[in-house]
Amino acid sequence: MTRVWLRRGLAADAHRLVLALAAELAGGRPRLVHACGRCGSDAHGRPVVLCTPRPVHASVARDSSGRLAVVAACLDGPVGVDVEGAGAADFPDFDAVALHPSEAAGDAAERTRLWVRKEAALKARGTGLTVDPRSLAVQQELAWLVDVDLGPGWACAVALGDEAVSGEGPVALEVVAG
């Protein structure tokens, strides 16, 4: 079973949350750096936790209002997380910027749920939004994606990267919230 640990808190505390979670899982004194897959910069991009003796894969999400941060960590391989306030993806051009040709989205809650699933999956793949979200059909392409219940008013999803899924057969993904 692959486990993903989640922590939530204020958006301003996201990096502190990642470091605390990494220290809890791997011990030692982890450091957090960034790696942009597009330009190679260490000033922004995917969070990378540097720690020993065990690597910790991490993902950080902040809702578009800047209130909430959710961080995810996995010891087995890449992980992606995304969070938004319910209805955040309800805007007129959503279909044009987000939907794969095989997808349809209904109400505001469904659109936002679809968006957080896509962004979590793209983060788990290591690309984030450098890949056009319209190229990904989450219902067809993703077996290792789960919605996370953060309570009313929030949409959240966690996805595993291919490297976190090993062996044959179905994957059991357990999300451990804290």
Image (tube, grey):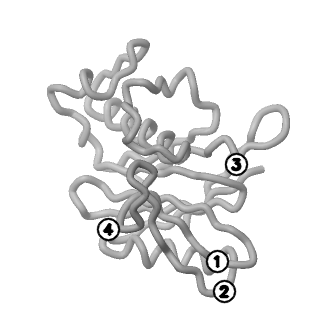
Answer yes or no: do the residues labelled 2 and 1 have beta carbons within 8 Å?
yes
How far, Cα to Cα, is label 3 from label 1? 18 Å
How far, Cα to Cα, is label 2 from label 3? 23 Å
In front of the other: 40 or 99: 40
Q: Mark 2 or mark 1: name the one nearer the start of the chain.
A: 2
Q: Residue at x 64, y 67 (%)?
A: 56
Where is the C terminus found, in terms of image quarters? Answer: bottom right
Q: Amino acid at mark 4?
A: Ala
Answer yes or no: do the residues labelled 3 and 1 have beta carbons within 8 Å?
no
Answer yes or no: do the residues labelled 4 and 2 have beta carbons within 8 Å?
no
Say whether residue 53 is left or right of residue 84.
right
Residue carrying label 1: 51
Residue 37 in the image: state x and y as whole percent.
45, 51
Note whether 103 is above or below 115 in the view shown: above
Residue carrying label 2: 28
Note whether 56 is above or below 39 in the view shown: below
Q: Residue at x 67, y 74 (%)?
A: 25
Say whether residue 47 is left or right of residue 154.
right
Q: Which-is-in-front pick, marks 1 and 4? A: 1
Residue carrying label 4: 11
Q: Amino acid at mark 1?
A: Cys
Q: Amino acid at mark 2?
A: Gly
Note whether 64 is above or below 172 in the view shown: below
Dot 3: few (<14), some (14–19), or many (≥20) neighbours within 10 Å?
A: some
